[in-house]
Image: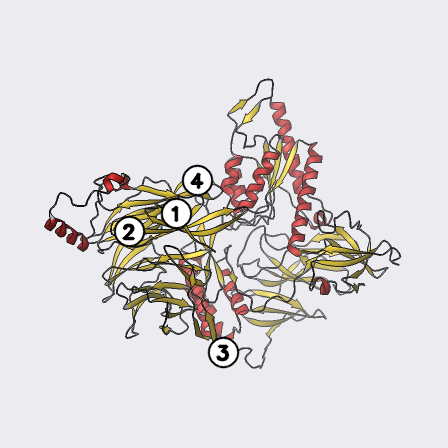
Amino acid sequence: SQDGQIFAFNRRSPYYSRKRYRGSNNTEIWLYNFKTKKFKRLTKNDYHDNSPLLAGDWVVYASEKDGVFNLYALSLKNGKVRKLTEYTDEPVRYPSISADRRYVVYEQGFKVWRLDLQTGKTDVLRVEVRSDWRRNPITYKEFRNRVDDFSVSPDNRCVAVSVYGDLFLVPLEKGDIVRLTEGPARDRKPVFSPNGEQLAFVSDRSGREEVYIINLKTRKITKVTDSDTLKSEIVWSPDGTKLAVAESDHTLNLYDVKTGKKRTLLKDAVGRPRHIHFLADGRWLVYTKPNRDWWTDIYLMRLDGKEPKEYRIADDMPFDEWSINCTKEAIYFLSEEYYEGDGHWKVAAYKLPLRRLTCDPDDPEASRLKKYEKFGKKGREKIQKKQEEKVAVDVEGMRKRIRKLFEVAGRLREMVVSKDGHIVVLVKEARGKKERNVLYYAGKDGKELRKLTAVGRVRRLRFSPDGKYVFYQIGKELWRIPRMGGAPRRVTFRVEVRVDRAAERRQILNECWRIMKHVFYDAKMHGVDWDAVRKKYNAILPYVADKEALGSIIERMFGELSASHMGMYVPEDVKPTCNSRHLGFDLVKDIKSGLYRVGHILKDGPADREWLAIREGDYVLRLDGKPLRVPDNYWKILNHLINPYVEVEVAASPDGKDRRKLRIKHISLADARRLRYKEWVERNRRLVEKKSGGRLAYIHIPSMEIRSLHRFRRELMRYRLKDGIVLDVRYNTGGYIDEYLLDVLERRPYYKSRFRDSVFTTKPWNGFFGKLVLLINQFSFSDAELFPHGFRVLGLGKLVGVPTSGGCIGTGSYRLVDGSRMRTPYNGIYTLDGRTLENMGVKPDIWVEETPEDEAAQRDPQLEAAVKVLLEELQTRKKGK
């Protein structure tokens, strides 16, 4: 307020991008009176009431009450609300108020408006900024050794690479780099034809993602496909006349390269085929596709009949098969053997011979027998010639022929096999608490295992066509190493790419729109006209000047879908100029002395050391050798420390008579947050212990990832003999471990054991059999909503708090041409009766809110209510007995 007595606020940052949100994670308006030190809630709805502005006896704010943000005014005298604007299309965003409290300025429809609070009239503010270009509209970017995608030429002399959306031929030894494509389109996924004369690739130059072919002699580019889908894999037939293309509509199509004629080989109800390979004669395709449980199985498809015929060849293997490789004689693949827990699987390499076996392949004596021994010389030559023409495939009995070749101590991640059967595998190995990736040469059929090199995070592991080298990507760099061992060599080159900044922004926005169109979990796009959305935001592009603004526009475009798990992450153009550090204690202003004093000291932090003997209330006189007084900004010092220790001069009195110089090892702000979190957990634990007389325990699950799962299991065992446990997923932003948590919690005792003259122990030992209650709030998000949903469905206990946020979608990530990333919400989460959990929120059994007063006083009424619930249930159970 103008007199400084009243403060209007939202308890969380106002959010405008996601439209039509309804749920507990909405913004509400509160007042704080500095004189009375009291809080007052002004609005309580399931929609957003954003950005409160005090104007005399009124609070002006933006509300989504009618589905579109408009400005409203709420009287502080009688609580009446009046609507100030009547927009029905584009929302009001980010209002601010003039110093005299007469005008409110806001954004609406990509324009800046002014509202006169006295007359109620609105007008557009014309903002005209005349300036030179901040950056050249056309620029040339230099890239050294950067590879987005690659393909090795059949003659092993060069690689085709995609760099920032353009295609190049890069020699592996000597020669010139050849530019194949140039322009704002994103050209990628290059694949050489078998004879090396053509290159297939995926491009969005038509506005859709299509497959094209470029003739490497004439540079003529021909469009092959004509379908509004995403193209995930392209594979040439051995004779170079056809392309097999896996598409996002779950189809596998065969295209004639010359005519473009399409033959649909399959359309799967579950998902798209992957790991596609032609057998050597082109009459057979090998691929994987998911079953109804989303485990992938290997399939063979025969192509030389009137209709393609499909064979499922590994259906008795219970888990995934992947990393498919084919030779003339066999199919090689990796498969999960059994689950080791916590997301880890034991993986082995397998071989499936294509022909019927006539002897034991593991019998060394049988393997020395000559082939075709019973035939004469002419007969053997005739059979051999026939086999070279066609690949013999005996479909009958294939399952019996699958043979495990080997497994390793670490985890097999990927395998490649050369045409003559040499195997190289990527293994993730444990090294203490860390893991590393290692490439191994496994010989033929895995009969030897020899380390080639330790590598980073590898992508796209491939053999060269002649089988002498293995190529792999680490980050954006391309490397190769001889298959038999030797020093790895980086493929080095330098290219320039012409970038039209405006065209690039247009390409990025339209690719984001297109990816969302094809991967969003709801094919009906939540009822939104997605084509109209594209037109709307393309019209704004001429006014977008940089990547930051582009990211904001794309965020708004995604917000039209009114869904969670979406976002646009743009690389920072400017690197941070400071590194903020923390002393391990808070600095509190003391107006009377004009000095800062030591506030709360973080437990187990750098200031909580006995040799420092620093106390709350001490006066801070100097920091890093510089005098410090109120209102000096001490972050100017803490942002630019050059040594791991900082000198802090403190005294027990403001006159500094007993001043002491201390050396404190400062920490990051992230480490300080972790220490505050530990204090919060310990405070909750003590409260539960005290309120229950030691009968109950408390476990907070901070996130739904493996580290939290390990900690949860340790703490569950620690409190295994308690009568009950208060579980807490408040402020948990999600992850993927709901199944693992529920698997532990739903275990039931089924026997007891006892040693002689000892006590009974209930089994299984790794379970908890007392009473449970689960705390949730509006900041429980994603998997931290799926977990309480399962907790309720399985009848594990009551839920206490307020409804969860209402954001339940499985999401992925997609990288754009400039390194930006967008989130891709591709997997819907539903109740057993078919209702989506997105925008629903899990409701508590016992509704308890936490107010700003509670937060300021460090009270936790939700936790206290949870303890009360458990104690009442324990009392009821005792009476029942």
Front one among 702 and 779: 702
Left or right position of 657 against 626: right
Quarter of the view holding residue 75: bottom right
Rounded to the nearest angstrom, the CA distance separating label 4 from label 1 is 24 Å
Left or right position of 408 against 389: right
Disc 4 versus disc 3: nearer the observer: 4
Disc 3 versus disc 2: nearer the observer: 2
At label 2, the amino acid type is: Val
- Upstream in the sequence, badge 4 or badge 3? 3
Q: Secondary structure at mark 4?
A: strand
Q: Which mark is residue 339?
A: 4
Q: Residue furthest top?
A: 757
Whether residue 773 is visible: no
Disc 1 versus disc 3: nearer the observer: 1
Left or right position of 36 against 351: right
Whether residue 1 is visible: yes
Front one among 355 and 297: 355
Within-10-Å neighbours for mark 4: few <14, some 14–19, many 20+: few
Q: Secondary structure at mark 2?
A: strand
Q: Which residue is mark 1?
A: 449
Q: Which residue is mark 3?
A: 137
Rounded to the nearest angstrom, the CA distance separating label 4 from label 3 is 54 Å
Within-10-Å neighbours for mark 3: few <14, some 14–19, many 20+: few
| Residue shown at 10% from the left, 51% from the top | 378
Q: Which residue is mark 2?
A: 286
